[in-house]
Amino acid sequence: MKTKPVRLGVNIDHVATLRQVRGTSYPTPFDAAQLCERAGAHGITVHLREDRRHIQDADVYALKRGLSIPLNLEMACASEILAIALDVRPQEVCLVPERREELTTEGGLDVRGQQETVFRVVQQLLDAGIVVSLFVEADPGQLDLCAASGAQYVELHTGHFCDLEGTAATTELRKLIEGAEYAHKLGLKVNAGHGIHLGNVQAILKIPHLDTLNIGHSIVARAVMVGMQAAVQEMLDAIQGAST
Ligand code: PXP
């Protein structure tokens, strides 16, 4: 039997990071998303953080308006962000934990620790016709609660695996494989993300039942490298064209 190809969701938060660090109007996540779409990406992911450190509200509205591939909005269970999600109505929302001081999302959502809030937010999103995913560790107890919440997807947190080496990495990968099998048995669809790059993606693809991999930082970093020569060439052409 032929297995379904794994889909790629590109997280473009760090295109917005480049814009925000200089307060410029460029580069825009929307332009980047169009290039991702042209390259064959299956979806676009952005994280609207409460501190608005990269993606801004207007980016989310522009992406929802202009993209023809699905928009996956990552967000914390915060009422202000929930109101925006319910107004924008992205195709999908992924609920994630959020700490102001963190550099990036550090761990999975603790559904057990905030069950009432998570279940309420999931229901509000489902009622609005939005597909819901929960970003969690591959822990059977958490996965049971994800299924009970009514969310259709889980996104397994691959960040720890991506930071490990040797037998510790093998153990973590086994946990992800077993978690994906368990989630599938519970009727959940399985995504995965965090820390994935060209050097570890083949190992990640050993996780069964994968629907979508959400990958951000490494793709934006790689885009700088594969685009640098063309960008320098463009500027040289502009300078030299003007001086001849
Ligand atoms: N999935 C989730 C839930 C995330 O929070 C992030 C980071 O924003 C990613 C995937 C992408 O991670 P990375 O930027 O390391 O590829």
Image: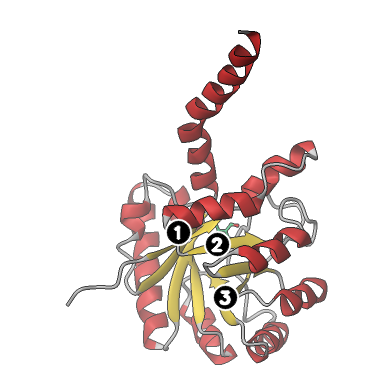
The crowd level at tag 3 (other Cα within 10 Å; few <14, some 14-19, many 20+) is many
100 relative to 143, above or below? above
The chosen color scheme is secondary structure
Of marks 3 and 2, which one's residue comes earlier in the chain? 2
The response on whether ligand 1 sits within 8 Å of label 3 is no
Residue wearing tag 3: 134
Residue wearing tag 2: 44
Circle 2: residue type: Ile
Per the image, label 3 sits on a secondary structure element best described as strand
Q: Is residue 100 left or right of residue 75?
A: right
Of marks 1 and 3, which one's residue comes earlier in the chain? 1
Residue extending farthest to the top is 244
Instruction: Look at the image and tell me in which quarter the N terminus lies.
Output: bottom left
Residue extending farthest to the right is 80
Task: Choose mark 1 or mark 3, whichever is in front.
Answer: 1
Tag 1 and tag 3, C-beta contact below 8 Å: no
Tag 2 and tag 1, C-beta contact below 8 Å: yes
Per the image, label 2 sits on a secondary structure element best described as strand
Circle 1: residue type: Ala
Ligand 1 image-quadrant field = bottom right
